[in-house]
């Protein structure tokens, strides 16, 4: 069978082959990764859809490949399964950030049913395994053509996903509501993203030797997302300090037990634990804004993205259900995720669905900084390095370890008071961490 | 001499050209239609679809009468009056041609009879029987069609070596007719001549007749033709031809050995070429591809912004209904309306015995493009209607997208397939699913039921077939 590049995630149409992990003639297990692909979103590995022997490799390292393209051929060992790769059909995920162009980064993609229902002007993209245009009658296609509408963006409600007049009308209605009620985003659309902004070419070589390097797909995505976030979100940066002297002492005491169990008791693990609980108490900080329906989408889950500095650039894997895990589980999961990110083995799913993000620069020695919010999340916590500082304790000067914090938040959803209360709970969590929560059961 | 001025010039009055001219006139444009043939209608009406179908229909009774004896109705030997057959056929063409002329007059489309030659991007010179005329236009639509290819090696200047144009005239009933090329034109005309009594031998260079048609759809045609024709030879080439008195000596390569055979007439049906020679295109910005067809965009516009091209001159499927659709698109584009050729399907019909018709994705195309599909089939042997028509050798099949059950293509072989395919066209264009077809009541007893039963068989629930599910 020919193994084709499956639909990896919505909006991902292809990528660059980073490495090929098999050779012709090699036996391969079902689900065994055979290739690494760098997409706009991440580097991910492609698993074999069935077991067998690799008879041919159709691609080379460094090659650009598209969804549906044949990657390798596998001669089935025993069972003769149909030759379709495990193509994921246009996953009905819907990012609740309707004003932004499609192709969200993997880090952010909602799957809340609520958001999906409320926002047809979402990231939906019709994709057919057969390469067919969206299913719609000639009359509907004519209307779409006359109005210059892209039917691949319209969700069909009929059997086989067929688009009827009601679907088209609902789509146009949403677009109109959006334009009328929310003129600001329309303006922001007009703001060219950094990727498309035509700037005067500058001859840098005039002033000395230079070197040019193509932006990687990941870099380009980060760049575009940052511009979008910066230009669309009215943001407040709230600074705070936390005294982590006691926490560090606890960490020192319990760290060896964690090390023995092959994991590290890092400050980020503590933060994940504290944030998981704090976000439950302050659900607005864990919410998203659905501009199409003018609703705030509250999430019962708490998936926290952790910014990781990798060779390829910034990657933000998402740690699921941080509110439900104990400190040990968080430490284990965090270690696994960061390792995978650094080894570029993270899957696209693992980059999606985050509801809040931590960016911890402590290990690099960073101080205060103002992080950029990952839309459609509404807040992000920036963490610097804990520094020994003289502070007043009970009227006396004492040397304490002070952790610089900055909560950046979307003022459309969170007010200053909300943010301060949320931040105070985070600080309290850090300053009075219960030893019982560290102890391994 | 003062040139004639017009808003839209259409060159060629075939099904593409006259449809475009009429549509433009209906939209309020001033239109001039230039046609070299005295009878409007182009290839389709004069030397294509219409005369060939007239002959196929007229000779059908000859084929039927042979089969009739087995049904207990024995007919005597037929008497064939070729002159009357030609007169009847010409009568149809005249009636249709006159109809187009009347429609043009009522729409105030100015028709000039003569041969057109582009002087520049906005001027056409027309050589008429009354001398030269010049037409100055704002936009032109080229719709001059194609003609049968006659390779130099076969072009003896002898009328016994015919193309489809000559064969449609039925100059006589040759005792032995060689058909070079087993494509749809050769197979259709072979069917006509075989019914009239000729011993028909078809030579095809490829390993199968009806290139491009799915093998299971071509098979019943092959079986029937093997009975009706004297012989069908595949993988065989004609090396050369020579006049031999009142016959043609044909040198054929068989098993790598040259072999001479004598035929009374030869029909060369090896493809068609666009009528673009001597059109003065070099005086415009129009460009052609490496096969000699005009290059144009999805709005039918050529590289010359004033000139559009529709139909056979653009290559692809040389079909009248495609040209008609393209004609409307070209007019809409000229009028500045949003328009583009984005029909999903262009149906095709081969009027052999039995007929073959298909639309949308074919099984072969899916395989070639590596598209995962499921095929649902219904064999006509289980259709009551097919048996009462004494045509059990048929097949209806649906090409289905497995994930969505959407119908991507339909193929039919059997009596009346050309009429049946339209339901398939509607299904594909409407993005119908197999469920939609299975749930639609089809009248009994008709051949259209085979469409529903094929859809049902996708779910393993066809009334008149056993699926593996039933058997297990």
Image (spheres, coloured by chain):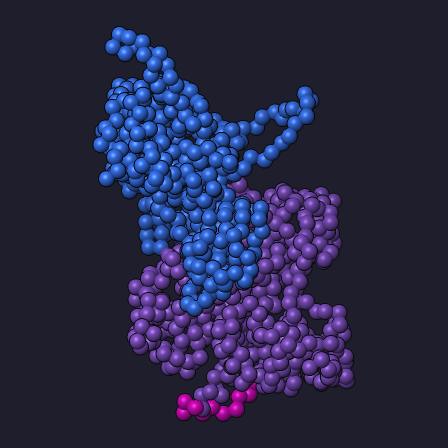
Chain colours: A blue, B purple
What are the residue bounds of the magenta stretch? B70-83
Q: Which residue occupies the foreground of this view, A108 or A178?
A: A108
Residue appearing at x 28%, y 29% in the figure? A274
Residue B237 spot, x, y in % from top left: 69, 76
Q: Looking at the rendering, in which quadrant would you find the N terminus of chain B?
A: top right
- Name the chief secondary structure element in magenta: loop
Residues B382 and B25: in front is: B382
| Residue A129 percent location from the top left of the image | 44, 55
Quadrant in which residue A203 is drawn: top right
Q: Residue at x 60, y 43 (%)?
A: B7
Residue A299 x, y percent position in the rendering: 27, 36
Residue occupying the far top of the picture: A395
In the image, residue A58 sits, relative to residue A397, either above or below, namely below
From the viewer's perspective, is B376 left or right of A39?
left
Q: Quadrant of residue A379?
A: top left
Residue drawn where x is 57% and y is 70% of the image: B211
Front residue of this view, candidates B206 and A30: A30
């Amino acid at each position: 069978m020919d193994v084709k590049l499956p639909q990896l995630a919505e909006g991902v149409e292809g990528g660059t082959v980073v490495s090929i992990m098999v050779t012709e003639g090699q036996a391969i297990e079902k689900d065994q990764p055979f290739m690494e692909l760098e997409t706009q979103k991440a580097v991910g590995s492609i698993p074999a859809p069935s077991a067998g022997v690799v008879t041919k490799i159709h691609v080379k390292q460094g090659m650009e490949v598209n969804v549906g393209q044949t990657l390798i051929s596998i001669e089935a060992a025993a069972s003769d399964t149909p030759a379709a790769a495990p193509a994921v059909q246009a996953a009905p995920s819907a990012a609740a950030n309707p004003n932004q162009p499609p192709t969200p980064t993997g880090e952010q993609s909602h799957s809340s049913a609520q958001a999906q229902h409320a926002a047809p002007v979402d990231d939906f993209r019709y994709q057919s395994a057969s390469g067919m245009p969206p299913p719609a009658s000639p009359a509907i296609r004519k209307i779409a053509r006359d109005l210059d509408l892209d039917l691949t963006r319209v969700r069909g409600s009929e059997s086989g996903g067929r688009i009827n007049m009601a679907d088209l009308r609902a789509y146009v209605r949403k677009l109109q509501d959006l334009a009328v009620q929310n003129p600001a985003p329309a303006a922001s659309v007009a703001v060219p993203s950094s990727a498309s902004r035509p700037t005067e070419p500058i001859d840098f070589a005039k002033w000395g030797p230079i070197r040019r390097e193509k932006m990687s797909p990941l870099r380009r995505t980060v760049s575009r997302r940052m511009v979008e976030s910066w230009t669309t979100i009215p943001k407040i940066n709230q600074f705070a300090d936390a005294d982590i002297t006691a926490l560090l002492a606890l960490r020192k005491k319990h760290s060896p037990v964690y090390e023995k169990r092959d994991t590290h008791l890092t400050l980020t693990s503590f933060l994940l634990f504290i944030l998981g609980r704090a976000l439950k108490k302050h659900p607005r900080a864990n919410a998203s804004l659905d501009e199409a329906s003018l609703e705030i989408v509250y999430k019962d889950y708490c998936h926290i993205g952790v910014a990781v500095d990798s060779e390829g650039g910034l990657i933000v894997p998402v740690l699921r259900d941080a509110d439900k895990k104990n400190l040990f589980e968080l430490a284990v999961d965090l270690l696994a995720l960061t390792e995978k990110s650094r080894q570029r083995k993270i899957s696209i799913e693992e980059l999606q669905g985050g509801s809040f993000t931590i960016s911890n620069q402590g290990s690099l020695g960073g101080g205060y900084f103002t992080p950029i919010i990952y839309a459609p999340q509404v807040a992000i916590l920036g963490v610097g390095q804990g520094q020994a500082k003289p502070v007043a304790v009970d009227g006396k000067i004492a040397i304490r370890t002070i952790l610089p914090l900055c909560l950046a938040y979307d003022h459309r959803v969170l007010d200053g008071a909300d943010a301060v209360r949320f931040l105070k709970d985070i600080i309290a969590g850090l300053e009075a961490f219960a030893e019982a929560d560290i102890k391994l059961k | 001499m003062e040139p004639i001025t017009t808003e839209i010039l259409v060159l060629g009055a075939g099904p593409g050209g006259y449809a475009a001219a009429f549509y433009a006139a209906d939209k309020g444009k001033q239109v001039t239609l230039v046609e070299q043939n005295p009878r409007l209608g182009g290839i389709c009406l004069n030397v294509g679809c219409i005369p060939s179908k007239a002959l196929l229909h007229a000779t059908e009774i000859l084929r039927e009468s042979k089969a009739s004896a087995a049904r207990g109705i024995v007919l005597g030997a037929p008497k064939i009056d070729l002159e009357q057959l030609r007169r009847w056929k010409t009568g149809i063409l005249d009636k249709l041609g006159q109809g187009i002329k009347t429609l043009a007059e009522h729409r105030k489309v100015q028709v000039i009879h003569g041969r057109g030659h582009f002087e520049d991007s906005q001027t056409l010179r027309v050589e008429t029987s009354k001398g030269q005329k010049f037409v100055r236009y704002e936009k032109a639509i080229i719709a001059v069609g194609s003609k049968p290819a006659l390779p130099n090696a076969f072009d003896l200047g002898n009328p016994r070596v015919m193309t489809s144009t000559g064969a449609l005239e039925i100059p006589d009933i040759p005792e032995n007719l060689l058909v070079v090329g087993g494509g749809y034109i050769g197979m259709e005309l072979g069917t006509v001549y075989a019914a009239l009594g000729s011993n028909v031998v078809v030579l095809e260079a490829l390993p199968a007749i009806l290139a491009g048609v799915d093998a299971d759809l071509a098979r019943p045609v092959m079986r029937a033709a093997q009975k009706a024709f004297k012989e069908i030879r595949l993988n065989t080439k004609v090396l050369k031809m020579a006049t031999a008195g009142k016959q043609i000596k044909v040198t054929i390569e068989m098993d790598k050995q040259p072999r001479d055979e004598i035929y009374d007439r030869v029909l060369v049906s090896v493809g068609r070429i666009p009528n673009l020679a001597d059109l003065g295109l070099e005086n415009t910005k129009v460009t052609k591809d490496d096969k000699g067809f005009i290059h144009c965009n999805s709005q039918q516009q050529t590289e010359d912004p004033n000139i559009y091209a529709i139909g056979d001159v653009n290559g692809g499927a040389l079909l009248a209904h495609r040209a008609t659709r393209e004609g409307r698109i070209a007019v809409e584009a000229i009028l500045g309306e949003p328009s583009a050729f984005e029909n999903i399907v262009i149906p095709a019909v081969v009027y052999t015995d039995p007929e073959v018709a298909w639309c949308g994705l074919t099984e072969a195309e899916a395989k070639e493009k590596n598209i995962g599909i499921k095929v649902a089939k219904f064999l006509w042997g289980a259709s009551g209607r097919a048996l009462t028509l004494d045509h059990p050798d048929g097949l209806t099949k649906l090409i289905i997208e497995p994930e969505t059950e959407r119908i991507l293509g339909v193929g039919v072989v059997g009596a009346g397939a050309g009429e049946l395919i339209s339901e398939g066209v509607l299904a594909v264009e409407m993005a119908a699913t197999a469920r939609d077809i299975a749930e639609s009541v089809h009248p009994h007893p008709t051949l259209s039921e085979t469409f529903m039963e094929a859809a049902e068989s996708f779910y393993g629930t066809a009334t008149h077939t056993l699926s593996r599910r039933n058997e297990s």
